[in-house]
Image (cartoon, rainbow, N blue to C red):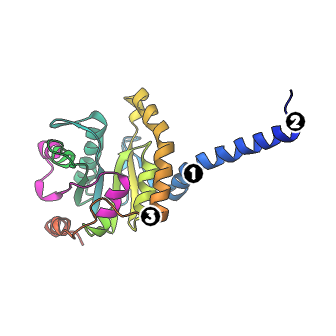
Amino acid sequence: MQPSRRRLRRSYLAAVLLSVLALAPMTWAWLVSSGHRAVADTSPGWLSAVPRAPVALVLGARVNGRTPTPMLARRLDVSAELYRAGRVRAILLSGDNGRPGYDEPTVMRDYLLARGVPGRALVLDHAGFDTWDSCVRAREVFGATRVTVVSQVFHLPRAVALCRAAGLSTFGVGDDSSRRWASTTYAYAVREFGASAKAMLDAALRSSPVFPGPRETTLDAALRAAGAP
């Protein structure tokens, strides 16, 4: 039996509605972050497109033992370039240290130390379990008010949108990982559909981070040591 025209119309409208709902979180992230993002290495003068900020917030990613994965290493390289160019005065390394033997922030710090970034400029957040937690803790635990968030391009709209929702004046810099790791990048980009939905919900509900405090002064000390206002 052929479906009626009315049933076909309803099915079509339902499909359209589901598509709109699926795309809404990513659209929200793109719109909120529009005009507040730059891509690293797009030109010799890419650093000049990044406004100065007191802090670079580097979002953690998986590590293998004592070694950052290639994408995380690129985030760290970008943050080091920002620091050396004077675009930021301190670097907040936020990642997962939620189980014994796994410590993203310490691996991130050691990587930057080995590349000449001074330890006094590096601050570790061991409870950055996801992007929202990292943004909220940067504001509420470490006292940041203005940051340059560093990640990959596919993640950047969500990262900037969440940091801004958490109350941070935020600009984002992303590594274009598709030029080096295309298949991995596209796989992560697909995951952004679900991650963006969670992000929009976290921002709307003002979700509390897994570990909300207490207030730490390590970032304040790093900025004083750098002579930052």
- The residue mark sitting in front, 1 or 2, is 2
Q: Which residue is pictured at 26% across the width and 43% down the height? A: 77
Distance, label 1 to label 3, CA atoms, is 15 Å
Residue 97 screen position, x and y as percent: 20, 49
Distance, label 2 to label 3, CA atoms, is 46 Å
Is 44 one of the magenta-colored residues? no
**Mark 1 highlights which residue?**
27
Q: Quadrant of residue 128?
A: bottom left
Element type at marker 3?
helix
Distance, label 1 to label 2, CA atoms, is 34 Å
Q: Are marks 1 and 3 in contact (CB under 8 Å)?
A: no
State the quadrant of the N terminus.
top right
Tell me the number on the disc at residue 165.
Answer: 3
Q: Amino acid at mark 2?
A: Ser
Residue 154 screen position, x and y as percent: 44, 42
Residue 73 screen position, x and y as percent: 25, 39
Instruction: Determine crowd level at label 1: few under 14, some 14-19, many 20+ residues with C-alpha closer than 10 A.
Output: some
**Mark 2 highlights which residue?**
4
| Image side of residue 138 versus residue 198, left or right | left
Magenta stretch bounds: 110-137
Element type at marker 2?
loop
The mark that comes first in sequence, 1 or 2, is 2
Q: Nearer the viewer, residue 31 or 21?
A: 21
Residue 118 screen position, x and y as percent: 12, 53
